[in-house]
Amino acid sequence: MTIVKPTKDPDFYRQRTSALLKSGYPITIADYDFSSSADMTRWHWHDELEIQYIVEGNLYVTCNEDNFIVQKGDIVFINHGINHFNTPADGNDCIFRAVLINPSFMFGFGQMELENKYVRPLLTSSSLKFIHITPRDDIYGEFVTHLSQIFSLNDNKPDCFEILTKVSVLNLWAIIYKHFYSDDSARNDNDSRFPSLDEQRVKQAVLYIKEHFMEPITLDDIAGSILVNRSECCRCFKRIMNVTPFEYLMKYRIIESTKQMLKKPTESISEIASAVGFNNTSYYNKIFKKYMSCTPTQYRRSSDV
């Protein structure tokens, strides 16, 4: 097992997705070691589905607004596009194996009917952000058997290991579909392959935020970008992302500021805060610590590698 430290590069996940898709085998496995608070991952999201298996120690996992602790033997599934980060718990080392699977690995060669029936509804389900499976759960044995097979196949790379890996991935997906996908209305809806009105609105609002986050935009501006009032805008975000538009804006600005720290190491904290839309450095420091569990200065120092 090759142990790696959590990455401090906020662009790593985008680059990894691109590399996986270009490779023709869009799945990868990595082993992570969290030994101190400096080893926490930062808020991030990626197109890949992620399954973590805790090898030893305890770990805090945060997915959107949910925070929970996992321990040795636990399994965590994180859906694609979900903001998440990990922090060590109890001051002890924690090691976990993670398998990252691009959804394109599931079906291919024009299998749109299968994708629309079994994949897309789960990827877009507002109720399936993450799954925490423990050894006490009934499905644990079956799930860990297929997961262990994926690890073994990709460690040893026997003949046809890619095909056999795909079989195991589909077996895991079938378990998730049968036991954790509970959105019956979407499952029975012939048009479930199309985004809901809430999803369309939130997607458009997120695009607006990404284009204007550095400006002094307000909730009225965000709501106006999708032609609804403030209350309906907040309800849409809560239903789809479980955060308010303002919370999403703050998180996005903070994430963008971490990128600026790496790209422009000579810029001051106040300059970076201003560049991502904060007109008050003290407030920026407060929000940064809320979401990153450290100050901007501490983050910058931990990134000087």
Image (cartoon, helix red, strand yellow):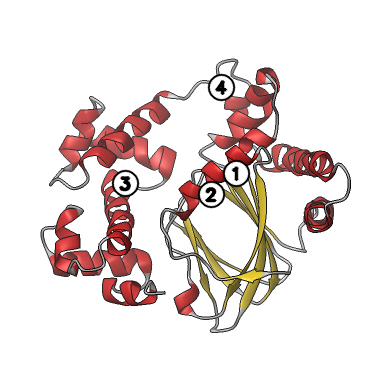
Circle 3 is placed at which residue position?
A: 244
Task: Determine whether, in the image, residue 201 is placed left or right of residue 50.
Answer: left
Q: Are marks 2 and 1 in contact (CB under 8 Å)?
A: yes
Circle 4 is placed at which residue position?
A: 192
The crowd level at tag 4 (other Cα within 10 Å; few <14, some 14-19, many 20+) is some
Residue 87 on image: x %, y %: 50, 71
Find the residue positioned furthest to the top.
190
* Residue 159 higher or lower than 230, as above or below: below
Residue beneath the point at 49% across and 51% down:
13
Mark drawn on residue 16: 2
Instruction: Report the Cα–Cα distance between label 2 and label 3.
Output: 29 Å
Question: Element at badge 4?
Answer: loop
Report the amino acid beneath label 2. Arg
Dividing the picture into quadrants, the one containing residue 298 is: bottom left
Task: Determine whether, in the image, residue 96 is placed left or right of residue 234.
Answer: right
Instruction: Report the Cα–Cα distance between label 4 and label 1.
Output: 28 Å
> In the rendered structure, which disc, 2 or 3, sits on the residue that comes first in sequence?
2
Report the amino acid beneath label 3. Thr
Task: Determine whether, in the image, residue 142 is placed left or right of residue 283.
Answer: right
Report the amino acid beneath label 1. Leu
Considering depth in this image, is 170 or 228 the residue closer to the camera? Answer: 170
Mark drawn on residue 157: none
